[in-house]
């Protein structure tokens, strides 16, 4: 899949699908989100343990979750950030439909 010039492997595509799943998925692992964000955004793990993400015009700093899965609010923030940058489930450069 090629989205906005970014090639995503199957693992990253699966993570995008989980992030955009309705109803919200409650088992999206933080390590999977970090891997995806590293592939599509400019990322920096800061000295205080927080994770700075620059994607498109947005910059967001995340506190890593205490458990392995991201919480609902973080999931919504990541979803909004990805969507505003043109990322979404089953779409690639605006050509593919969600029917696949």
Image: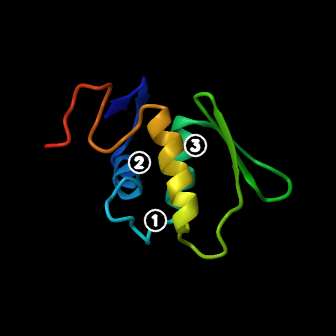
Give the residue at mark 1.
28
User: Nearer the observer, disc 1 or disc 3?
Assistant: 1
Given residues 8 and 22, the one toward you in this image is 22
Residue sitting at 54 percent across and 42 percent down? 81
User: Is any atom of residue 97 visible in this view?
Assistant: yes
Q: CA distance from mark 1 to mark 3?
A: 16 Å
Label 1: how many Cα within 10 Å (few below 14, some 14–19, many 20+) = some
Furthest-right residue in view?
A: 47
Q: Say whether disc 2 or disc 1 marks the residue closer to the N-terminus.
A: 2
Determine the secondary structure under disc 3.
helix
Q: CA distance from mark 2 to mark 1?
A: 12 Å
Given residues 1 and 52, the one toward you in this image is 52
Label 1–label 3 contact, CB within 8 A = no
Q: Say whether disc 1 or disc 3 marks the residue closer to the N-terminus.
A: 1
What is the quadrant of residue 68 in the picture? bottom right
Left or right: residue 7 versus residue 72 is left
Give the residue at mark 3.
38
| Residue 87 against residue 62 in the figure, above or below | above
Given residues 12 and 71, the one toward you in this image is 71
Quarter of the image containing the C terminus?
Answer: top left
Give the residue at mark 2.
12
Could you tell me residue 80's position as x and y percent?
A: 50, 45
Q: CA distance from mark 3 to mark 2?
A: 10 Å
Furthest-bottom residue in view?
A: 67
Quarter of the image containing the N terminus?
Answer: top left
């Amino acid at each position: 899949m090629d989205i906005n010039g970014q090639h995503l492997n199957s693992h990253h595509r699966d993570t995008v699908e989980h992030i955009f799943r309705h109803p919200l998925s409650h088992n999206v692992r933080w390590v999977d989100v970090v891997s995806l964000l590293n592939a599509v955004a400019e990322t920096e793990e800061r000295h205080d343990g927080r994770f700075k993400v620059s994607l498109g015009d947005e910059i967001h700093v995340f506190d890593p979750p205490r458990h392995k899965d991201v919480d609902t609010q973080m999931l919504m923030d990541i979803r909004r950030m990805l969507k505003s940058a043109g990322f979404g489930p089953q779409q690639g450069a605006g050509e593919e439909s969600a029917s696949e």
